[in-house]
């Protein structure tokens, strides 16, 4: 076997904190061979990022390392800063999760790549510019020459991550360390980025270390896999060994916890008997939420950002409607408009026949008792200065003000028990709890008034897979017990399939397809739905290496430009960014299966 | 069939003892207590305050009792021999230009200066928080209107404002508090508003709205507790600013009226007789400088302790 590019020997990372020493990485050894992709998978807090930050000498000031980290035989931990800088950024490069924070905001992207090339490769200006364009073309950035002059904020997330990759590979590194490179991106963009990275690996023969929490990403990319937990490697092997014959129970648990699109869907309890008549709780008709966006110019002009642009649906008692779509499709805005947290521009939201937009303050209060929301970020949605007991009690105190203190505390304790929290923790603060526990607090808060409808806005997206599975189970069991309806907003198609009766796909504020769960996943009709489903990565190396099947516009277009709404119906498009465009109709293709008009592809 | 909930499955039952949480305040206090400069400052400041409150009670001299035989006499222990005369050992800080005991006067000055500092700061705090949080939370045109009003007040020259007040209403102890407080709240309101704007965007505010909490409930229960951190830091820095402002006014002869005194008055008098009796400047000036230092160190320590990045 050839000499490894990077090898760690009994490597440790420790942090000195006021609460004592944290042993973040324990006794880790691995080799990265030339031209291979090593996947490092683990949940948050497993030490996977710290391991590689430490390898490059990028630890926070309170961190220390022990053991060896050899780059072609040279111990990186013992190198002087000057020598390390010669390797870092040229021979070993790193890309991070958030490309906006790792690009310098005030420099044109071309200049940033040129700078790196000139510093590390001693190129002349002209050579460096040529090199920069080449590397941008390599990551399939259209019109690379023109984009050299753009600033990072002018690019979308996917484009920025491509620029980061171009920058990281421009100097021809031996090793590329990618830390969650696609976690912040939409599935379709993720599929494109992974495709580019696979390409680079074969073209440039660069070794890649891919750090991810996502088994699907690892399955799609890695040759060998290290599974990390609590700072230790618990399992290592080739990608096929780890995915098809996992030996360690933690690996098995991780694999089992992932909802898979290729597995049988798993039962979702039918809406409870008695309500089988499907009493309609929520009836949304042609809802529009537009935000005025100020357009540059001497005289300020306002254009409408059509976040939600004519959405109609109904929701029955005990039913769960999944809402999927990529970032910017208006799914969160829709959820907030239904809750009357945002004013709607047009359209009607009827709750049990009563119109929400007309509700006065008192009516709105009664309504809030019926409709509650669970947010995405469990920590951010809890007031850091309040105990979790106070947070959970809040809806009760606001909506049922005449309850006595004792009753409130009793209800809070009951509610905590219901979501699997020890009521003894009633006086704890959010920062003392884990993400999963905080999300239970969020659910307890929503459930304490026993609402008829709970809106889950990406409620499990910020959680680790194992916790995610527990929270999904919790939500499902609560739903069954209290016969509540749900609107489950998520970008994760697999989770939505697990919980929903019906699924609605949004694209730029409009419904492109809505159908029963099985119909939409087995027989997607709209090209966008198909693209979304085919872009989902399966935690299965053989299945996830096929390319993105359905074509997609490279970028999610601007929602201010009225043309972009007709991306799938170009034949009816008027070529003027401000024109009033044709509104695609929804066509019924099966019982309850509506698809937006689109050109055949 | 009733589904089994996770809590029941795990046999999770109510524990006997309720766990006490560790709030962010407790954390911040622990960090503050580790800051040696801040702790030392708190001890010094506490001593100065205790001295100011209690020591004059036990002193045999009154702050306004004049002893003509001891005009401008140095303390007994004064090392320089070229002084006019020496007071006896009980006049620790010597005598001032009209023959009053400087020790008692310095501590009376401390009372006044600290009281002005605290009261004026509290006034500015109350107005500033209420005003700033309201403007920040309501936002839009209300915010615009309220903050432009602040801008207008800002543009009025502070000293003229106070001089005019003093001239119209005569020199008045209460008026001094009001005048200084009325100026200091402007900055406080701006800081609170800025903090409110950033807190308002956070998800827990939206969560509270979804829970049905009204705007005043959100401001009082969620916004204000979360802006208090930076505000406390600013308060500890406002107190010395107010003390300085009072001294400045007194120095100009617009502040406290004789025979009552403050550090500013004492320093003004001391500066006049610096040549012949330097102790009349040195003692009040040292007290004031030490106090201001202490407040600044405490403010610094608080800022470090409350910094959310350190969480």
Image (cartoon, coloured by chain):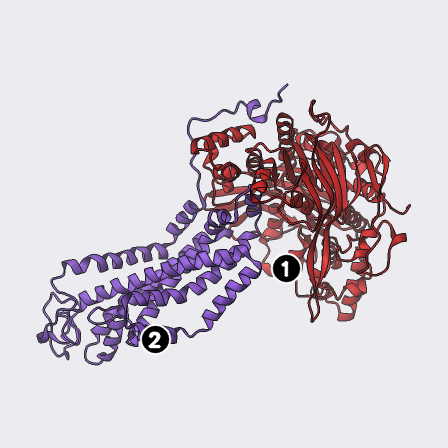
Q: Quadrant of residue A374?
A: top right
- A298 sits left or right of A405 in the view: right
Viewer-side label of 1, 2: 2
Q: In the rendered view, would you say A496 is above or below A176? A: above
Reading the image, the residue beneath label 2 is B163
- Residue A1 x/y as whole percent: 76, 42
Q: Is A193 or A126 nearer to us in this picture?
A: A193
Q: The chain coloured purple carries which letter?
A: B
Q: CA distance from mark 1 to mark 2?
A: 62 Å
Which residue shows up at 26% across the image and 70% down it? B256
Secondary element under disc 1, as helix, strand or loop, is: helix
Tell me if mark 1 has few (under 14), some (14-19) or many (20+) residues whose alpha carbon lies within 10 angstroms of its own.
some
Chain letter of disc 1 in the image: A
Q: Is residue A334 above or below residue A261?
A: below
Left or right of A506? Residue A405 is left
Q: Which residue is mark 1?
A: A85
Q: Which chain is red?
A: A
Residue A231 in sight: no
**x, y (%) of residue B52?**
23, 60
Q: Which residue is at a point 32% across and 69% down the rendered structure image?
A: B246
């Amino acid at each position: 076997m050839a000499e490894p590019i990077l090898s760690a020997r009994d490597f440790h990372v420790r942090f000195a904190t006021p609460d004592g020493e944290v042993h973040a990485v324990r006794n880790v050894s691995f080799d990265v061979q030339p031209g291979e992709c090593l996947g490092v998978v683990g949940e948050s807090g497993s030490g996977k990022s710290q391991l590689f930050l430490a390898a490059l000498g990028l630890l926070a000031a309170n961190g220390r390392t022990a053991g060896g980290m050899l780059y072609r035989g040279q111990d990186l931990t013992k190198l002087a800063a000057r020598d390390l800088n010669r390797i870092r950024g040229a021979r070993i490069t790193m890309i991070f999760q958030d490309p906006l924070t790792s690009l310098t905001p005030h420099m044109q992207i071309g200049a940033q790549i040129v700078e790196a090339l000139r510093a590390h490769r001693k190129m002349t200006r002209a050579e460096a510019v040529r090199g920069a364009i080449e590397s941008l073309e390599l990551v399939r950035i259209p019109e690379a020459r023109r984009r050299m002059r753009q600033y990072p904020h002018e690019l979308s997330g996917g484009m920025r991550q491509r620029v980061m990759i171009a920058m990281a590979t421009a100097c021809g590194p031996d090793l590329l360390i990618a830390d969650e490179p696609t976690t912040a991106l939409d599935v379709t963009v993720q599929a494109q980025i992974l495709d580019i990275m696979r390409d680079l690996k074969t073209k440039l023969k660069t070794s890649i270390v891919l750090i991810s929490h996502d088994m699907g990403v690892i399955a799609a990319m890695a040759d060998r896999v290290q599974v990390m937990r609590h700072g230790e490697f618990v399992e290592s092997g080739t990608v096929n060994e780890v995915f098809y014959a996992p030996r360690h129970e933690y690996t098995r648990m991780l694999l089992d916890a992932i909802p898979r699109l290729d597995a049988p869907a798993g039962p979702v309890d039918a809406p409870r008997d008695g309500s089988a008549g499907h009493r309609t709780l929520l009836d949304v008709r042609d809802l529009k939420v537009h935000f005025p966006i100020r357009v540059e110019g001497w005289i300020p002009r306002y254009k409408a950002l059509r976040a939600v642009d004519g959405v109609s649906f109904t929701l029955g008692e005990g039913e769960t409607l999944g809402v999927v779509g990529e970032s910017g499709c208006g799914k969160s805005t829709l959820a907030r408009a239904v809750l009357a947290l945002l004013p709607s521009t047009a359209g009607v939201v009827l709750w049990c026949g009563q119109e929400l937009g007309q509700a006065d303050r008192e009516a709105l209060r009664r309504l809030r008792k019926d409709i509650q929301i669970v947010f995405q970020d469990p920590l951010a949605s809890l007031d850091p200065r309040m105990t979790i007991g106070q947070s959970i009690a809040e809806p009760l105190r606001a909506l049922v003000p005449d309850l006595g203190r004792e009753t409130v505390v009793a209800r809070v304790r009951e509610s905590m028990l219901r979501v699997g929290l020890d009521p003894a923790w009633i006086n704890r603060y959010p920062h003392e709890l884990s993400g999963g526990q905080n999300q239970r607090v969020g659910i307890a808060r929503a459930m304490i008034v026993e609402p008829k409808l709970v809106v889950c806005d990406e409620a499990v997206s910020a959680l680790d897979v194992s916790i995610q599975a527990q929270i999904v189970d919790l939500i499902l069991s609560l739903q069954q017990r209290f016969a509540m309806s749900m609107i489950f907003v998520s970008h994760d198609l697999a989770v939505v399939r697990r919980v929903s009766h019906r699924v609605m796909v949004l694209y730029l504020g409009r419904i492109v397809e809505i159908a029963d769960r099985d119909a939409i996943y087995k027989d997607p009709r709209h090209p966008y739905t198909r693209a979304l489903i085919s872009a989902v990565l399966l935690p299965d190396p053989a299945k996830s290496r096929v390319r993105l099947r359905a074509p997609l516009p490279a970028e999610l277009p601007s929602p201010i430009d009225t043309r972009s709404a007709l991306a799938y119906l170009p034949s009816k498009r008027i070529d003027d960014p401000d024109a009033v465009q044709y509104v695609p109709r929804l066509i019924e293709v099966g019982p309850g299966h509506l698809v937006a008009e689109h050109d055949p592809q | 069939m009733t589904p089994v909930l996770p809590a029941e499955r795990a046999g999770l039952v109510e524990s006997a003892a309720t766990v006490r949480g560790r709030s962010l305040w407790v954390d911040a206090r622990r960090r503050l207590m580790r800051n040696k400069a801040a702790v030392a400052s708190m001890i010094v400041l506490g001593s100065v305050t205790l001295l100011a409150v209690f020591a004059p009670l036990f002193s045999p001299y009154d702050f306004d009792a004049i002893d003509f035989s001891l005009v401008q006499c140095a303390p007994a222990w004064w090392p320089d021999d070229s002084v006019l005369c020496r007071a006896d050992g009980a006049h620790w800080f010597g005598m001032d230009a009209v023959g009053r005991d400087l020790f008692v006067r310095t501590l009376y000055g401390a009372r006044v200066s600290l009281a002005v500092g605290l009261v004026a700061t509290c006034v500015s705090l109350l107005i500033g928080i209420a005003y700033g949080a309201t403007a920040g939370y309501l936002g839009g045109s209300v915010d615009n209107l309220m903050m432009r009003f602040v801008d207008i007040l800002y543009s009025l020259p502070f000293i003229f404002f106070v001089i005019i007040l003093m001239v119209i209403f005569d020199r008045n102890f209460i008026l001094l508090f009001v005048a200084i407080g009325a100026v200091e709240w402007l900055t406080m309101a701006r800081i609170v508003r800025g903090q409110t704007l950033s807190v308002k965007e956070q998800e827990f505010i939206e969560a509270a709205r979804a829970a049905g909490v009204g705007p005043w409930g959100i401001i009082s229960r969620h916004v204000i507790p979360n802006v208090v951190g930076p505000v406390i830091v600013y308060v500890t820095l406002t107190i010395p600013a107010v003390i300085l402002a009072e001294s400045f006014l007194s120095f100009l002869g617009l502040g406290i009226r004789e025979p009552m005194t403050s550090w500013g008055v004492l320093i003004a008098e001391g500066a006049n007789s610096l040549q012949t009796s330097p102790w009349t400047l040195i003692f009040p000036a040292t007290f004031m400088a030490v106090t201001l230092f202490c407040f600044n160190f405490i403010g610094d320590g608080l800022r470090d302790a409350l910094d959310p990045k350190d969480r």
